[in-house]
Image (cartoon, rainbow, N blue to C red):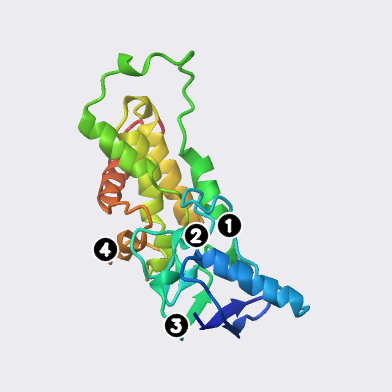
Amino acid sequence: MKLTLHIWRQKNRESKGSFEKHILDNVSEDMSFLEMLDVLNEKLLLENKEPVAFEHDCREGICGSCGMTINGYPHGPEKATTTCQLHMRKFKDGDTIYIEPFRSNAFPIIKDLVVDRSAFDRIIQAGGFISVNTGQAIDANAIPIPKKNADVAMDAAACIGCGACVAACPNGAAMLFVSAKIGQFAMLPQGQAERKRRALAMVNQMDAEGFGSCTNFYECEAACPKQISVRFIALMNRDYLKASLSDENVA
């Protein structure tokens, strides 16, 4: 395939960025999207030009670091697929592809397609964990958990923290991510001891990071590569309201 690529280039967060045009020939439909960018970067290096900076790690749809916006879609046009798992067979010979970083005030651009997602790390640090010392791990079957609860918790835990929900949301909201990280513990007995404190701390940190508010566009759910449901946002809102009204709202 022969493709015309328009790629966002920006030296750092202070500089002004713009799209840069590249023509790439002999692209195999069996390549992943990141492998196509690898080929482009090899071409640029041979031409003594600066390669395109983009983030990646596992290339297996697990780590969430490969996020970029492709033709206006976070992670590209294929539903429930990360950028690294998107293959070039989804495009046609002669296509024009626009590639840019996730756009959000809370995700400042580091370089080219790489954005700073450390705001997510700070939200997790605020309360996305279980700190209660439970001693030695007991047998998994010793704590009876209804299958429905376990399934819902696993659905929430599927979130890889890529930030596609933020990039897709017109308000730049991070509520799908935060609600998934709250929800994965809210359905399990291990998460009950700190449930109120967790909801308050993580939502307050989300607001402090400058993310927008949810107004039910549902773009986050549509863009999520792991298909996290917006029902977790409703669960988070209930937990946050209950914790805010509680006399022991930091318990």
Q: What is the secondary structure assignment of the residue under circle 2?
A: helix
Disc 3 or 2, which lies upstream in sequence?
2
Instruction: Measuring from the top left, give residue 209's x and y in whole percent.
Output: 51, 57
The residue singled out by tag 1 in the image is: 56
In front: 53, or 137? 53
Residue at left offset 45%, top offset 42%: 201
Disc 1 or 3, which lies upstream in sequence?
1
The residue singled out by tag 4 in the image is: 216
Q: Residues within 10 Å of mark 2 (few under 14, many from 20)?
A: many
Which amino acid type corresponds to the residue marked 4 in the rendered image?
Asn
Distance from disc 4 to disc 2, alpha carbons, whole Å, reads 28 Å
Quadrant location of the C terminus in the rendered image: top left
In front of the other: label 1 or label 4?
1
Instruction: Measuring from the top left, give residue 195's x and y in whole percent.
Output: 36, 33
Q: Are marks 1 and 4 in contact (CB under 8 Å)?
A: no
Rendered position, 185 above or below 230? above
Which amino acid type corresponds to the residue marked 1 in the rendered image?
His
Distance from disc 1 to disc 3, alpha carbons, whole Å, reads 26 Å
Instruction: Measuring from the top left, give residue 136's x and y in whole percent.
Output: 48, 13
Q: Is residue 9 left or right of residue 45?
A: left
Q: Which mark is residue 93?
A: 3
Could you say which quadrant of the image residue 134 lies in? top left
In front: 222, or 21? 21
